[in-house]
Image (cartoon, rainbow, N blue to C red):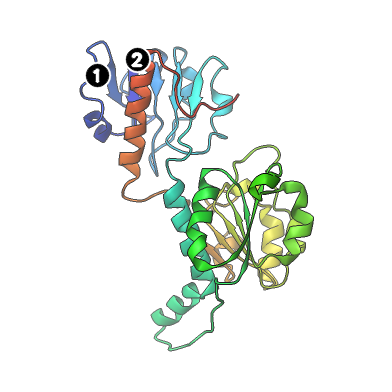
């Protein structure tokens, strides 16, 4: 059995595996440690490391693809159905939820423009908007959505949670209810996976239904939002946004989102905290142990 890890730090988490397990560090697709056709268990690169999308199709013996991210949309088409793909759902929920709260508060309290005024040496008070009492529409009821909901509780918001299908017993509304819910939302937080059903979920009709001054917070995937439609609403000043993901991503030079004053943009860092590496490699170690013991793997992705 051969395992490819994205960083040598991972070796400390797997150093005591059986001798028949070979572990190599694969952190550069242009300088592979060995023949990819011999890899059994693969963990792709993290953060800003080079990606291996062109290498994975050559892994003919690959049995497990363990992703370090919660999303798997960019990998499903690269491997045959016989390869088990596992994601890291739940692993980054707390960190992502913290980003959501930070970005929401930053936009409501005008922190980006206040910081810009600071750099210009200008004392320019700007009245902010209370989060307390706001009507918050949280679209996404998975682990990230649950983490966001818990962190919103102390802020005394009027929270409505939306999932793919309604769960009346839990007080969760369905996506079909959005036309009724959007016109009364002060803040809309989107934390859904990218699927055929959620691509451009936030389109021109969705945005037009929001009241003037509403804030859109996207911590899911860039293509969930129609960028062209959003730009129209932002440039008019009718809506504001906080985006950890964009479409395209990364944003190319000269893209109008870069200079959009009503948008706060971060480069997909919602899950990136100093504890990220430890979280990922603890999951990897658990998954490798399960694999060697012949036990079911956690977080299997439906294909």
- Label 1 belongs to which residue? 17
Helix, strand or loop for disc 1: loop
Report the residue at 47% width, 74% height from top: 111
Mark 1 neighbour class, 10 Å CA radius: few under 14, some 14 to 19, many 20 or more: some
Residue 292: assigned label: 2
Mark 2 Cα within 10 Å, few/some/many (few <14, many 20+)?
Answer: few
Q: Are marks 1 and 2 in contact (CB under 8 Å)?
A: yes
| Quadrant holding the N terminus | top left
Mark earlier in primary sequence (1, 2): 1
Q: Nearer the viewer, residue 211 or 120?
A: 211
Asked if 289 appears above or below 118 in the picture, the reply is above
Residue 131 % position (x, y): 55, 71
290 on left or right of 261:
left
Q: Quick one: 197 or 155, which is closer to the camera?
A: 155
In the depicted structure, whether residue 105 falls above or below residue 4: below
Q: Secondary structure at mark 2?
A: helix
- Residue 235 percent location from the top left of the image: 67, 69
- Could you tell me which residue is drawn at 46 percent across and 51 percent down? 96
| Residue 107 image point, x, y percent | 53, 70
Indicate which disc residue 76 carries. none
Give the x, y percent position of residue 132. Answer: 55, 72
């Amino acid at each position: 059995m051969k395992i490819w890890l994205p960083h040598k730090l991972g070796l400390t988490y797997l150093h005591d595996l059986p001798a028949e397990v070979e572990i190599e560090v694969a952190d550069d697709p242009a300088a592979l440690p060995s023949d990819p056709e011999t890899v059994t268990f693969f963990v792709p690169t993290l953060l800003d490391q080079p990606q291996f999308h062109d290498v994975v199709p050559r892994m003919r013996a690959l049995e497990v693809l363990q992703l370090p991210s919660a999303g798997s949309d960019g990998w499903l088409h690269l491997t045959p159905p016989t390869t088990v793909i596992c994601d890291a759902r739940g692993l980054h929920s707390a960190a992502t939820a913290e980003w959501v709260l930070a970005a929401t508060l930053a936009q409501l309290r005008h922190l980006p423009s206040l910081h810009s005024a600071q750099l210009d040496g200008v004392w320019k008070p700007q009245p902010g908007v209370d989060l307390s009492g706001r009507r918050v529409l949280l679209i996404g009821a998975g682990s990230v959505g649950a983490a966001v909901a818990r962190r919103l509780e102390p802020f005394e918001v009027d929270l409505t949670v939306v999932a793919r299908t309604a769960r009346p017993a839990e007080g969760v509304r369905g996506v079909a209810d959005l036309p009724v819910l959007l016109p009364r939302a002060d803040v809309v937080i989107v934390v859904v996976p990218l699927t055929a059903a959620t691509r451009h979920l936030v389109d021109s009709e969705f945005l037009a239904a929001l009241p003037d001054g509403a804030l859109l917070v996207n911590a899911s995937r860039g293509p969930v939002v129609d960028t062209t439609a959003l730009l129209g609403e932002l440039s008019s000043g009718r809506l504001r946004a906080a985006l950890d993901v964009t479409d395209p991503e990364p944003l190319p030079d000269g893209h109008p989102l870069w200079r959009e004053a009503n948008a706060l943009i971060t480069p997909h860092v919602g899950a990136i905290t100093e504890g990220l590496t430890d979280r990922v490699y603890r999951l990897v170690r658990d998954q490798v142990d399960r694999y060697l013991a012949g036990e079911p793997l956690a977080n299997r992705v439906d294909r």
